Amino acid sequence: MQEIGILGAGLIGASWATFFAAQGLKVRIFDVDDTVKQQAWEQSVRNLQRLADLELLTREDAATAEGKLKVAASLAELLTDIEYVQESVIEDYAIKADVYRQFEQHAPERAILASSSSGLLMTRMQAVMQHPERALIAHPFNPPHLIPLVELVPGEQTAVETMETVKAFFLGLGKHPVVLNKEVPGHIANRLAAAVWRESLALLDAGVASVEDIDAALCQGPGLRWALMGQHLIYELGGGAGGYQKFIDTIGASFEAYWEDMECWSSIPESAKQKAVSGTQDYLNQKSPGEWAAWRDEKLARIQQILHEEP
Ligand SMILES: NC(=O)C1=CN([C@@H]2O[C@H](COP(=O)(O)OP(=O)(O)OC[C@H]3O[C@@H](n4cnc5c(N)ncnc54)[C@H](O)[C@@H]3O)[C@@H](O)[C@H]2O)C=CC1
Ligand SMILES: O=C(O)[C@@H](O)C(=O)[C@H](O)[C@@H](O)CO
């Protein structure tokens, strides 16, 4: 696949445009909002220059990639003869269903439709399609031009061939696809993030520590290891010579006491919302959101450089 359609060019769509262009693919950008799609083009150009600043792209490759970016004047222009579309419209079933109906009016019959959806079920979204077999979830982590994970989730009508094609496509582009055998709300990564986020809120709500200390306890501790390993490998190593079984039989028992004490909220208490929003203001006294995002991207780039040095 040499040309990509970006359908929905907000925060994630613009980053996807950067990623695909940086990989040497032609990219057509479309959004219902003309201002947004132009801003997405401009943001992608800035992102490419940033990747060159971070030495993740040569200046020459960044310039070449910029030439790959094109704003589509209409949905028809986006979709004519396209092979692969990354959909990143608003996370709403009704909006996505309407987009999928329009998609099928213009796109070739075999064009693949990959949704960035954070947690909607593809089975429900593809139900409106004449050719649902070519639709799947390809969920990134923000920003996709810097974070390698992409979660591939089939709906009940997604063809095995579609999953295999998209997995090979992303592997060839240097992404790290993980394949879900069945769809669950939030896929994998957002469910893991949701578990950690809920406890981060619960600790704050209970007055155990401040926003900054709760965040520091995560990113200055387990978070560092999470850039390298997941919990299963971490605890295999945590069991020493006895491995994972030793860890489960000894330290694992302590976790059962933690779980007994931890909240099992299915909604966020108002008190927790208020403490989280007010506590996060301290960060904004240090940097603006844009400065935090630039700081994040530079650190993410340097972590990637280290991770790419070794197998
Ligand atoms: N924001 C994040 O951190 C992440 C978001 N996602 C997913 O990506 C998708 C987009 O999220 P964001 O980029 O954050 O949202 P966003 O609000 O920044 O962008 C959504 C864009 O969709 C456009 N849009 C709405 N209806 C449209 C239509 N009919 N045709 C074309 N464009 C249309 C809007 O104009 C808007 O620019 C969602 O499904 C979200 O779950 C996935 C990973 C991370
Ligand atoms: O955290 C991310 O970048 C992604 O996993 C997301 O999907 C967004 O954070 C947000 O949509 C949470 O679901």
Image (tube, helix red, strand yellow):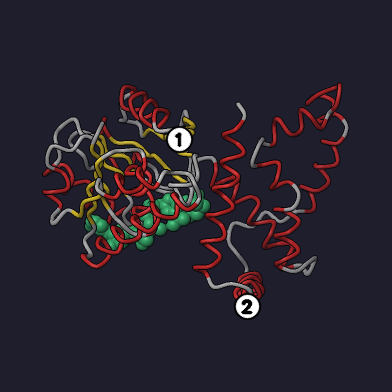
Does any portion of residue 308 appear in the rendered image?
Answer: yes
Residue that appears at 24% across and 68% down: 35
Q: Residue at x 62, y 76 (%)?
A: 281
> x%, y% of residue 262?
75, 54
Q: Is residue 64 shown above or below 170?
A: below
* Callout 2: CB less than 8 Å from ligand 1: no
Q: Tell me the CA gap for discs 1 and 2.
A: 35 Å
Q: Which of 150 and 143 lies nearest the eye of the viewer?
A: 143
Q: Earlier in the sequence, mark 1 or mark 2?
A: 1
The vertical placement of 165 against 52, above or below, is above
**Residue 285: which numbered mark, if any?**
2
Q: Nearer the viewer, residue 95 or 214?
A: 214
Asked if residue 91 can be seen in this view, the reply is no
User: What percent of the width, then of the height, locates residue 92?
Assistant: 34, 56
As shown in the figure, which amino acid type bears the numbered disc 2? Answer: Asn
Which residue is pictured at 55% across the width and 43% down the height? Answer: 189
Residue 22 versus residue 293 in the image, above or below: above
Q: Report the side of 118 relative to 60 (left or right).
A: right
Residue 215 is left or right of residue 303, and the answer is right
From the viewer's perspective, is 81 left or right of 215? left
Q: Which label sits on residue 175?
A: 1
Q: Give the number of callouts.
A: 2
Which corner quadrant of the image does residue 86 belong to?
top left
Q: Position of residue 174 (x, y in %)?
A: 44, 33
User: Left of 118 or right of it: where is 94?
Assistant: left
